[in-house]
Image (cartoon, rainbow, N blue to C red):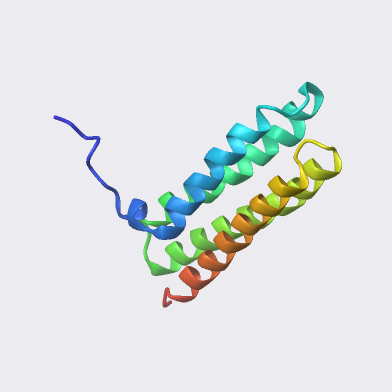
Amino acid sequence: MDYRNYVFDFEKLDVYRKALDFTNEVFSITLSFKKEIRYSLGDQFRRAALSICNNLAEGSRKTDKGKKQFYYYALDSARECIPMISLASKQNQIDVKQEEKLRGECVHISNMLYKLSLSITN
């Protein structure tokens, strides 16, 4: 049986798809970080970005109260990416254009997550 076309409910969320694209971009960008930064800042940045997607996936199988909590966890992870974007810029690991793009994507994802969490009733 071919499961490549099976779609989980969280995969239908626009915010999940945006978060997945953001995470993919973070993974690609952090590969070019200097070695001494790649294993500290880069690793933490990848884990925070991936956590956005993972919390959306885990929250999808919960009751409304649990779902809302995991959506807030995803939001916390998105916010956690902001200082890493700033530090990557200060450490000259990303240029101004990359910083603006990553920050804009992160803000957009954060806004989407906040609205999604508000849409869940307790």
Relative height, residue 81 to residue 66 (above, below): above
Mark yes or no: residue 56 visible.
no
Residue 107 position in % (x across, y down)? 63, 62
Residue depicted at 43% across the width and 62% down the height: 67
Mark yes or no: residue 37 visible.
yes
Relative height, residue 38 to residue 11 (above, below): above
Residue depicted at 61% across the width and 39% down the height: 26
Residue closest to the eye, 62 or 120? 120
Q: Is residue 76 left or right of residue 8?
A: right
Relative height, residue 1 to residue 19 (above, below): above
Residue 46 position in % (x across, y down)? 62, 38
Residue depicted at 59% across the width and 45% down the height: 49
Q: Quadrant of residue 33?
A: top right
Q: Is residue 102 left or right of residue 69?
A: right
Quadrant for the C terminus, please: bottom left
Q: Quadrant of residue 45?
A: top right
Residue 108 position in % (x across, y down)? 57, 63
Q: Quadrant of residue 5?
A: top left
Q: Is residue 99 left or right of residue 110?
A: right
In the displayed image of the protein, which residue is found farthest to the top?
35
Residue closest to the eye, 14 or 114? 14
Residue 81 position in % (x across, y down)? 68, 50
Quadrant for the N terminus, please: top left
Residue closest to the eye, 96 or 63? 96
Relative height, residue 105 to residue 111 (above, below): above
